[in-house]
Image: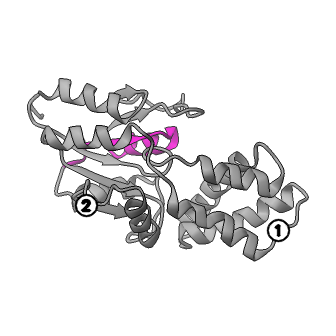
Amino acid sequence: MNSKNTKPVLLFDVNETLLDMTPLKNAINTLLEEPLAFKIWFGMVLHYSLVDNCTNQYHDFSAIGAAMLGMAATSLNKTVTEDEIKKTLSIIRNLKAYPDVLKGLQLLKENGFRLATLTNSPENTLKEQLINSNLTDIFELVLSIDTLKIYKPDPTTYKWAATELNQQPQNIIMIAAHGWDLAGAIHAGLQTGFVAREGQSLYSLSDKPTYEAKDIYEMAMVLIEKYK
């Protein structure tokens, strides 16, 4: 068992946890002329990424996202072109970090925490996102399931990240704004931290996260106090 002063490695989800998805939400809602279009689309993206897991296939998150935007349009009786889909989804590469993110991550780094990412986004998208949000130099390791070709929340993904970080799962805290992500991490034996971004909630049928905070800065203060 780790002592109080042994700092865990912090593993961050990227989209909605660190990066503000509002521009993409607005673009999808506008394209499909439906205020809930983004929620419909994102739910379908998660659904069909798990279809890939279950059928031993792999299409990267960008390909699934594009296919699902077309399917969402069909379900809403809208017609969209491939160019419209491509232009809309390209926004995800240029998302900005929430105002609390850089300050919180820098504070954690200054206090001796190791920081890494684990995302369902493809590697090339992840790299562009970190560059465009000025987060490139924050993380010692940026992990995408694109390498493994199995999507979160499959427990395999978190255990693979632990191996890449040369850590036991219990010495890692997965920090995310999604209940499904944390449910997978808990099942894999990681500690977890829930960031309560607007509109996000925990999965009530899973165990509760180890830590909860309203944003990354507050999470940083919680963890610094815990492991000082």
Tell me which segment is drawn in magenta.
168-190
Q: Is residue 172 magenta?
A: yes
**Furthest residue toward right:** 77
Mark 2 surroundings within 10 Å by alpha-carbon count, few (fewer than 14), some (14 through 19), many (20 or more): some
* The disc label shown at residue 141, or none: 2
- Label ID, residue 80: 1
User: How far across and how far down the image is residue 95, in percent?
Assistant: 51, 55
- Left/right of residue 140 with respect to residue 2 in the rendered view: right
* Residue 109 in sight here: yes
CA distance for labels 1 and 2: 37 Å
> Regarding mark 2 in the picture, which secondary structure is present there?
strand
Q: Residue at x 38, y 63 (%)?
A: 131
Count of numbered circles on the image: 2
Q: Say what amino acid the circle numbered 1 marks.
A: Val
Q: Residue at x 63, y 54 (%)?
A: 24
Q: Quadrant of the N terminus?
A: top left
Task: Single out the residue that lies furthest toward the bottom.
Answer: 82
Residue 199 belongs to the span the image colors magenta: no
Q: Nearer the viewer, mark 1 or mark 2?
A: 1
**SS assignment at label 1:** loop
Q: Quadrant of residue 219?
A: top left
Q: What is the quadrant of residue 103 in the picture?
A: top left
Q: Nearer the viewer, residue 40 or 180?
A: 40
Residue 126: where, in percent of width, then height? 42, 64
* Mark found first going from the N terminus, 1 or 2: 1
Is 205 displayed left or right of 141 in the figure?
Answer: right
- 147 shown above or below 9: below
